Image (cartoon, rainbow, N blue to C red):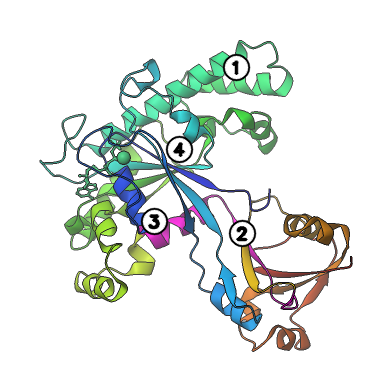
C-alpha cells in the first residue's frame, strides 16, 4: 500500500496528441509524436515528480542535502479506434497495459488543424470520447465474460463480476454502479478499465488555451455534460495545449518564462507538467509523507517523499518500507507536520517548541507528516 507506484495511462483515439502531452508533462522529447495515426505502438513510460513546494524546505530544515520528490508513472499507449474490441486498428491488446493503471487520462482533440489527420474525419470531442468510452466498456464486457467462464472464478469475485456485467450491458461503467470498497477489492486483479477514475485532457490549440480561455472552459464543461459512458460524479477534466506545452518544455528556463509571460500563461496553475500530477494526487486521494529529517547524517543524507494511498498506512509499515531492521527494531515514531516544521531553523528547534509528537507503531500516517522512526538494532 505504501509507495506503490501510481500509474497513469494516456488513452484516446489515434493522433489526438497523447504522445505530445506525454512529452509536455515529462518536459523532454521521450515519445515520438508525429502527424499520423498509430505513431505510437510500444508504450512510452516515464516517472513524473509530484510538485511539492515544501519539500526543499523540509530537507533544509532537516539538514539533509538531498530531497527526493514522490513520483507517479506516466504511460503513453497506442491509439484506440472504433471496433478495437473486435480487433480493429491495433486491437485492444495494449489495453493490458492500461489495466495496470490507477487512473486513465483520456485525451480528446478539440483543436482544429486541417494538416493534422483525424481518424474520424472531423473534430468532435464528444463523438470521439464516446467511441473510446464504448470500446473500454466492450473490452471490460469481454474480459469479464472470459473470467466468468473459468471454473476458479467463484464466491465474491463471481458475484461482483455478475453484478458489473449486468451494469455494463445496460451501458453503465463499473465505477458507476456503486460498488463498495470490499466489492472493488474482490475484483481488483481484473483491472477493469471502466472502474478507473477518468481525467479528460481537453487538448486545445494555443489561442483557445490563452486568449479564448473562458470560451474553452465553457466548451469543456459542455463536453463533460454531453459525453456518454462517463461518470458525472467522479470524472473530471483539465484544459491542456499539448503542442504549446511540449514546445515550451524544451526551452531553457529564462526563455520559457519570458515566452509564457508574453502569452499570459502561469506555470503553476496552467501548465500540465505541474497541474496534472497534483490533480492525480487529488483524484486518487494520495498523501505525501517524508522521512529523513531528524535522522543523524551518517544514517541518511536524504529527505525522501513517499506516496501513501487512502485507507491508511501505519508507522510500522513505513518502517518496513525503509528497512527490515528498522521495522524489527521499531521503538516509536516522532511525527511533525511539514507545514509546521518549515517555520523553524532546525528539526530540534521544532521539537523544542513542542511541534513534534510521539506515536506508536499503529499510528496511521497523514498527509504532510514528517516521520522519524526511532529503532534499535
Ligand atoms: N494542441 C494541439 N494543437 C495542435 N496540434 C496538436 C496539438 N496536440 C497535438 N498536436 C499534433 O497532433 C499530431 C499527433 O500528435 P501525437 O503523435 O501526440 O498523437 P497521439 O495521440 O500520440 O497519436 P498515436 O495514437 O498515433 O500515437 C502531431 O502532429 C501533434 O503536433
Ligand atoms: Mg502517440
Q: Does mark 2's beta carbon lie closer than 8 Å to ligand 1?
A: no
Badge 2 marks a residue whose secondary structure is strand
Residue corresponding to mark 2 = 287
Front: mark 3 or 1 = 3
Residue at screen point 41% across, 38% down:
43
The residues bearing labels 2 and 3 have C-alpha atoms spaced at a distance of 22 Å
Identify the disc placed on residue 119: none
Badge 4 marks a residue whose secondary structure is loop
Badge 3 marks a residue whose secondary structure is helix
The residues bearing labels 2 and 1 have C-alpha atoms spaced at a distance of 34 Å
In x, y percent, where is residue 212? 19, 59
Front: mark 4 or 2 = 2
- Answer with mark 3 or mark 4, whichever residue precedes in sequence: 3
- Answer with mark 2 or mark 3, whichever residue precedes in sequence: 3
Badge 1 marks a residue whose secondary structure is helix
Residue at screen point 33% across, 30% down:
130
In x, y percent, where is residue 21? 32, 50
- The answer to which image quadrant residue 119 occupies is top left
The boundaries of the magenta stretch are 272-298
- Answer with mark 4 or mark 2, whichever residue precedes in sequence: 4
Vertical placement of 168 versus 25: above or below? above
Image quarter where ligand 1 lies: top left
Between 356 and 179, the residue placed more toward the observer is: 356
Vertical placement of 229 versus 25: above or below? above
Identify the disc placed on residue 231: 4
Residue corresponding to mark 3 = 26
The residues bearing labels 4 and 2 have C-alpha atoms spaced at a distance of 24 Å
Identify the disc placed on residue 147: 1
The residues bearing labels 1 and 4 have C-alpha atoms spaced at a distance of 25 Å
Instruction: Tell whether label 1 touches label 2 (CB within 8 Å).
Output: no
Residue at screen point 52% across, 33% down:
99
Amino acid at each position: 500500500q505504501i509507495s506503490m507506484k501510481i500509474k497513469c495511462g494516456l488513452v484516446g483515439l489515434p493522433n489526438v496528441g497523447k504522445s505530445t502531452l506525454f512529452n509536455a508533462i515529462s518536459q523532454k522529447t521521450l515519445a515520438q509524436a508525429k502527424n499520423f495515426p498509430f505513431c505510437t505502438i510500444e508504450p512510452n513510460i516515464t516517472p513524473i515528480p509530484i510538485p511539492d513546494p515544501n519539500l526543499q524546505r523540509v530537507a533544509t530544515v532537516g539538514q539533509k542535502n538531498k530531497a527526493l520528490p514522490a513520483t507517479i508513472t506516466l504511460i503513453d499507449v497506442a491509439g484506440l479506434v472504433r471496433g478495437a474490441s473486435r480487433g480493429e486498428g491495433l486491437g485492444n491488446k495494449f489495453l493490458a497495459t492500461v489495466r495496470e493503471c490507477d487512473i486513465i487520462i483520456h485525451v480528446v482533440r478539440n483543436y482544429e488543424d486541417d494538416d493534422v489527420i483525424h481518424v474520424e474525419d472531423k473534430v468532435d470531442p464528444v463523438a470521439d470520447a464516446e467511441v473510446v468510452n464504448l470500446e473500454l466498456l466492450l473490452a471490460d464486457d469481454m474480459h469479464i465474460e472470459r473470467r466468468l467462464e473459468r471454473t476458479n472464478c467463484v464466491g465474491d469475485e463471481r458475484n461482483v463480476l455478475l453484478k458489473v456485467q449486468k451494469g455494463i450491458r445496460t451501458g453503465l461503467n463499473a465505477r458507476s454502479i456503486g460498488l463498495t470498497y470490499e466489492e472493488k477489492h474482490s475484483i481488483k486483479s481484473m483491472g477493469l478499465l471502466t472502474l478507473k477514475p477518468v481525467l479528460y485532457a481537453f487538448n486545445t490549440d494555443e489561442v483557445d488555451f490563452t486568449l479564448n480561455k473562458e470560451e474553452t472552459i465553457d466548451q469543456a464543461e459542455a463536453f463533460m455534460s454531453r459525453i456518454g459512458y462517463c461518470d458525472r460524479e467522479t470524472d473530471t477534466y483539465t484544459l491542456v495545449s499539448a503542442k504549446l506545452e511540449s514546445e515550451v518544455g524544451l526551452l531553457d528556463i529564462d526563455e520559457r518564462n519570458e515566452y509564457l509571460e508574453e502569452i499570459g500563461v502561469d506555470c503553476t496553475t496552467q501548465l500540465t507538467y505541474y497541474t496534472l500530477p497534483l490533480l492525480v494526487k487529488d483524484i486518487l486521494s494520495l498523501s505525501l509523507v517524508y522521512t529523513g529529517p531528524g535522522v543523524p547524517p551518517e544514517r541518511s543524507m536524504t529527505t525522501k517523499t513517499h506516496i501513501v494511498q487512502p485507507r491508511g498506512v501505519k508507522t510500522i509499515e513505513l518502517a518496513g518500507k525503509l528497512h527490515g531492521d528498522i521495522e524489527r527494531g521499531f521503538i516509536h515514531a516522532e511525527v511533525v507536520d511539514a507545514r509546521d516544521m518549515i517555520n523553524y531553523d532546525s528539526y530540534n528547534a521544532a521539537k523544542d517548541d513542542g511541534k513534534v509528537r510521539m506515536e506508536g507503531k499503529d499510528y496511521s500516517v497523514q498527509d504532510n507528516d514528517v516521520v522519524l522512526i526511532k529503532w534499535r538494532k
